[in-house]
Image (cartoon, rainbow, N blue to C red):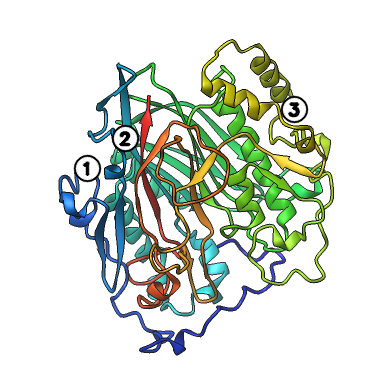
Amino acid sequence: MEPNDNIPPAKRRKHDPADQKGGSPSESDNTNHAILYNSGNIIFPDNEMGNSCVSKEDQETSFIKVGAVHRKWEDFTSLYKSNQGTSESKETSNGKQKEVFDFSVMSYNILAQDLLEDNGYLYKHCSQPLLQWGFRFPNILKELKQLDADILCLQEVQNNHYGQQLKPVLESLGYHCEYKMRTGNKRDGCAICFKRSKFSLVSASPVEFFRPQIQVLDRDNVGLVLLLQPVLSQSAALVCVANTHLLYNPRRGDIKLAQLAILLAEINKLASDGKGGYWPIILCGDLNSVPESPLYNFIRNGKLMYDGLPIGKVSGQEQSHRGQRPLTKPLWPPSLGISPACQYETLNCQQTMKVADAVDSSEESKDFTKTRNLPLDELTPSAIWHNFRLMSVYSHYIPGTGKAEVTTCHSRSAVTVDYIFYSATKHSVSTHSGGAPHDGHLQLLGKLALLTEQDLWTVNRLPNENNSSDHLPLLAKFRHKL
């Protein structure tokens, strides 16, 4: 949660939890019913903490015990006709041996202590001792250890806690850590940490969204983009990992879109493979936008016609948009140096020339060229677009029930704002319909299922005695075709 920044009050909950069967926890109820990760039930085929603990019958949905509720590990490997081996296995493609590489990614807003204390009204359900950093840090660290992701994308990482506690501990666990603190006088930021046994660092690019003299970019949010090399092979395809925490303010969709455009331009710069295409991309973070909002659909579909869109509708956080000014073109000034295609202007010219000169006749290259040669109706000042083909790990609804997933749940709100997007292969598991076609390098092997608002009310919301952030960690496992 970001500090108040001319922000309207959080919207009311859609229902009164007291009307639920059995009532709701009292404001001071800190009974030990919080989400409890049982390391023996965490399901990763190559995870040292949970090796070979899934039967064939239970491959698709294996449960992780969480006290009063369960978070399921949803395993999709059985849905693929091939690639059934462990990480670093071989698969046959057109008579050729091809290496594959499995790895896991977490996105987690760990709730900076300063922001917790600045926004205490959000945590009235929680007793004060449970909100102290000395109590919270061991719980957060326990989650990180038990879920044991190969790549951690963390938001709201407070600077002093990162330097004195989090970084030293993670380095002792085999991680390499990169960090970008917010600008101005803000004390938290974003971190990306990866296991040295899995990846080596090719490049790191911290991204500042604050730009002097540009009115739409006057906030201190940041991002971080890394280019990683799988250690399996020095000739293997790289992986681009991005992490960000966009502005909270529900009524400033213009700022959110401009911040996102800068991040996408940096991803475009780092992820370019030099041949007219991109390395696999994973985009994580707290985007302060809900599923199916214009900002969300822009990421998934690759295009947004924004002219006339109410400024408060962009993130979908508010139900009413009456009296709000519409977005107008251009969304950001030319002086920013970023095109409507969310590319740095100089790189945009260079990449267009490379595509025009490409001689590769493969279907993948043909598809890529088509995406770069955009139709004239897309080259309008009232549209922004990007050329990544990204899919969300999460479907945002619980299968079979239709109930909404949530990634954050405190005293004032319960909603999804956290995401993991990835460059999906054409045959990757998809729980979505529509969107851009997918031709990336990553297959989704599994994910840690999310919960509903009702589930989290049974454990007295977040944070609680065993879960010390107001967000849930997101976790996914991918197969990278090298």
Please name whichever residue, 230 or 180, is drawn nearer the observer in this view of the structure.
Answer: 230
346 vs 77, left or right, is right
Residue at 38% from the left image edge and 65% from the top image edge: 400
84 vs 236, left or right, is left
Kindly identify the amino acid type of the residue bearing the numbered disc 2.
Asp
Upstream in sequence: badge 2 or badge 1: 1
Residue at 78% from the left image edge and 35% from the top image edge: 379
Q: Which residue is mark 3?
A: 345
Please name whichever residue, 183 or 79, is drawn nearer the observer in this view of the structure.
Answer: 79
Closer to viewer: mark 3 or mark 1: 1
Q: Which residue is mark 1?
A: 45
Upstream in sequence: badge 3 or badge 1: 1
Q: Is residue 219 something that shows in the picture?
A: no
Residue at 66% from the left image edge and 68% from the top image edge: 318
SS at mark 2? strand
Q: Is residue 202 something that shows in the picture?
A: yes
Closer to viewer: mark 3 or mark 2: 2
Q: x%, y% of residue 426? A: 46, 35
Kindly identify the amino acid type of the residue bearing the numbered disc 1.
Pro
Number of numbered discs = 3
Kindly identify the amino acid type of the residue bearing the numbered disc 3.
Glu
Q: Which residue is mark 2?
A: 102
- The reply to whether discs 3 and 2 touch (Cβ–Cβ < 8 Å) is no
Q: x%, y% of residue 375? A: 74, 32
SS at mark 1? loop
Check disc 1: other Cα within 10 Å, few if <14, some if 14-19, many if 20+: some
Above or below residue 144? Residue 194 is above
